[in-house]
Image: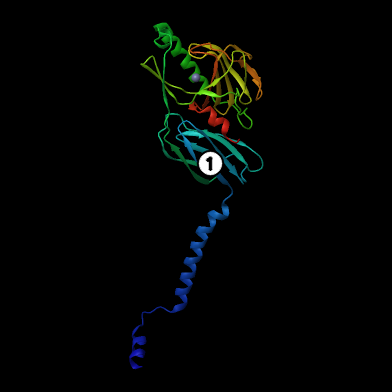
Amino acid sequence: MRHLISENRNNKYLKPPVPEVFLAGMVFFVTVLIFLLPVSAETFRAEISPGKISQGDPFVVKVTGLEASSPPSAVLLEKEILFSGCGDGCYIALGGVDLNTKPGIYKVTVTAGREKRDLMLSVEKTAFPEIRLTLPKEKVFLSPEDIERTEREKERLTAIFRTITGKLWDGNFITPLGNSVSTGFGVKRIMNGKNVSVHKGVDIRGREGEDIRASNAGRVVLVEELFFGGNTVILDHGQGIYTIYMHLSKARVDSEDIVSKGDVIGLVGSSGRATGPHLHFAAKLQDMTVNPLSLISLAL
Ligand SMILES: [Zn+2]
């Protein structure tokens, strides 16, 4: 008993219990406040779908519950993903990765006002098949004049694909020709045993003269006979999204025409570098080569 009393007396530096409880209370309160503040200010949700894609696939970013009046912004690999409204507090955007994007996990940061959301996008390695084909020599090994022509055409197309205009697309993209695919996206074609080219679109089977339809609403930005593509139509759907239709026997639109989704824009043929009648259908998203079938499969 004496021992205990003396111990208490000796402990003169022991602080009274009240301020300690008070201090702990304050720390707890501030901690809770720090955790609560961002939660209570949370005004939107952001999701990416699909979260797992192949090289060259587009994807959708959807933001809901956004109270701010201005649209959100998002960036992936230094390219801005452009949003458009989809109802009250809702914004939707089409993003994509180029066919040559390295597989891996990428971060898509969505910003609205002072808030950010990090979304994860997994780009899976894709085993694109290889095919060998034989074409007339002059279509594989080009003359200096043809090389010059193809370079000129390539530059012209690049300038088109880098142009970003206002949104014209509306809802899902549709298939321009409802037949089966003969050569898929990303297929590596080895021509005449030497010349290698990567297939940057899909070939859809078709009979000569069959109708080809606009995959979405847009503006006709090119109607021309190209060296590789033959008679070609390009539609600008706005926000850097383009669809390309090649090897037509005939175009049914003129440059600058505005088309609706499903309008007939041309007829199947085998013009340009083609071994038979078919449609080469391709898509570009801010100058990235994307799989047009994946674009069609997105719920927009
Ligand atoms: Zn093709």
User: At 53% from the left edge and 41% from the top edge, which residue is drawn?
Assistant: 48
Residue 112 visible from this viewpoint: no
Position of 24 with respect to 12 (left or right) is right
| Residue depicted at 52% across the width and 60% down the height | 33
10 Å neighbourhood of mark 1: few (<14), some, or many (≥20)?
A: some
Q: Amino acid at mark 1?
A: Ile
The image quadrant where one finds the N terminus is bottom left
Farthest bottom residue in view: 2
Image quarter of residue 145 = top left
Expressed as whole percent of the image width and height from the top left, the position of residue 177 reads 60, 22
Q: Is residue 115 above or below residue 98?
A: below
Instruction: Classify the position of the C terminus by image quarter.
Output: top right
Q: Quadrant of residue 66?
A: top right
Against 29, residue 273 (above or below) is above
In-image side of 202 versus 90 (left or right): left
In the rendered image, the vertical position of residue 34 relative to residue 258, given as above or below = below
Q: Residue at x 64, y 38 (%)?
A: 86
Residue 47 visible to the viewer: yes
Q: Position of residue 64 (x, y in %)?
A: 60, 44
Pick the front one: 284 or 251: 251
- Secondary structure of the residue carrying numbered label 1: strand
Residue 148 image-quadrant placement: top left
In the picture provided, is 126 more to the left or to the right than 69? left
- Image side of residue 24 versus residue 65, left or right: left
Residue 161 x, y percent position in the rendering: 51, 22
Residue that label 1 marks = 48
Q: Could you say where residue 58 lies in the image, as x and y percent from the top left?
A: 52, 33
